[in-house]
Image (tube, grey):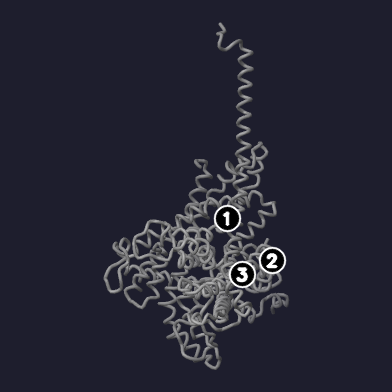
Amino acid sequence: MKPAVIRTLSVPARRRLSSALWAAAAMLCTFGVALILLLVIGYILREGFAALSWSFLTHLPRPVGVPGGGVGNGLVGSGMTVALAALMAFPAGMLVGIYVAVYAYLSLARLLSFLADVLAGVPSIAIGIYAYTLLVAPFGGFSALSASFALAVLMMPLVIRATEGAVRAVPRELREAATALGATDYRVTCKVLLVAARPGIVTGLLLALARVTGETAPLLFTAFGNQFWEFDPTKPMAELPLQIFTYAISPYRDWHRQAWGGALILVTAVFVLSVAARLSFLLLRGRAADGTGP
Amino acid sequence: MSDPESGPASVQASALRSNRRLAAGLAERRERVAARLFTAVLYGCCMLFLLVMGGLAVELLWGSRLSLAAFGPGFLWSTEWNPVRGRFGAAPFLYGTVVSSLIALLLAGSVGILAGVFLAEFAPRRLGAALGTMIELLAAIPSIVYGLWGLFVLAPVVSGWIGPALQAAFGFLPIFRGPIYGVNMLTAALVLAVMIVPTITAITRDLIKATPMYYREAALALGATRWESVAKVILPTVRRGIFGACMLALGRALGETIATTMVIGNRPVISASLLAPGYTVASVIANEFTEATSALYLSALIELGLILLVTSLLVVGLGRLMLRLFVP
């Protein structure tokens, strides 16, 4: 005969069963979500590779029915627009991030930090309208520069948060040691905090780039799109996401094919940036740790 | 032995000392100037940031003044969107945005929280890391790509398979009645759900991982099963954080533009059926902004942008506040 105490400790079968079922449901959900990634990526690879060719990457778009045609101008346009946006957002965003992290005890810094958090969630289409009323309407024309501004506004909160996080992660002792040796805030920041936080900052910048590279909504009425080569940022410019959008909602089969090709390029670019972000963190941190750099 | 240029040793030493002091003074002054300059530049950038972000609100408010004056608060509940007659009402778009986002949140919330629980509590370490990375990569895919996928892959599945199945099972409900389209509210909600599920899963996982181990141990010691320790102890302690995560996800769904524009059908009507096309606030801006033919038309579209901005700031602000206040 079993001792009574064991029987009271053992979990009733009904509870065990329901627990197991819930755990199984949780597992199914996880695998389901991961499966969606595989489905999306699989489709893009299958359909995209069919459209990919050297001329697709280097040629201008052609009218419907004319064979060939590519997204060369869109690639150049997207590259220029994103690079200009980075030029605007990186320095300013990093400096705000440093301020927020170094003077975290000030209420202004706390307010800015919270603002950056919230503004990272502003719909990109609203920022597109902002760029339109500020830079397109008064100057009488769509321009790549206004698109860069919109992307920069989108990026700034991300850059601020990344910099803040990286600087805050620097051990307190390091900072206190530098201050104790008589270094000013400026010295401490430039020679200690920034050096130690560099891997985190670089990662954050790359992730911010990846995030805005695929943005489409704010480009609709800023960069507007262009059928030809355009290298002047004050003129309307072709953008890869816009080309994908136009091709996707068109009724032509050949354009659908090109939309998948464009999507493959875009996803590749975004993934390369994301992976570069992770790798650069490991690489820079490793170098900083073994004393050979920076 | 002492040459006339340098003088005796003591004089030489004192000259050197004063020279050094001078150099030190200069360096110190340079240091002070640099430090002050640095602080000024930091402040300047912070002000620039506030200015740019304040400008966003001001520009949208100023841009929508015509529409605000013409329609007042009635803009929110008028269902007429007629550019030819110059009548603009936001109700169909608000309805589409709210309904598609809420359905997406319902789906992504239930699936995402369960997935977060699995990753944090049940998955073996390696498998959990791999699945977690995959789900995070899902968040990196641009929305235009989700739109493309939704339009060409998901929409046919919805019109050919999911829609008919729902109609067969729940056809008595008005939300599943009427003709089935491929591009409809349900497709939009599904695409949005896929887009926001990584946010919910990742935050839930991190919240659960951050709860102290002794919570679990205490529950298990009292005789709870593994699942019961999660459902009755861990999840209640992080519920505010999870609510915050859901608000962040909702904010993203409300403002999502390109993906919904491609799959929701873009028809400015309020229909009871989820299988019929709809329209969202962001989509109508994307579709009609460059085609706005009158100042009032453009102003009405900017007011829609303003509504979107305010709503998502409130929702995301609430989410961030929850995550900041209640998560250690």
Are dots 3 and 2 on a single chain?
yes
Instruction: Name the foreground residue: B317 vs B324.
Output: B317
User: What residue is shown with label 3?
Assistant: B310
Name the residue type under label 2: Tyr
**Compared with residue B259, is residue B130 higher up or lower down, i.e. above or below?**
above
Q: Position of residue B284 (x, y in %)?
A: 50, 76
Name the residue type under label 1: Ile
Chain letter of mark 1 equals A
**Compared with residue A236, is residue B36 higher up or lower down, i.e. above or below?**
above
Chain letter of mark 3 equals B
Asked if the residue at tag 2 contacts the one at tag 1, i.e. Cβ–Cβ closer than 8 Å, the answer is no
Mark 1 burial class by Cα count in 10 Å: few <14, some 14-19, many 20+: many
Q: Earlier in the sequence, mark 3 or mark 2?
A: 2
Q: Position of residue A171 (x, y in %)?
A: 63, 47
Q: Secondary structure at mark 2?
A: helix
Can the viewer see residue A99?
yes
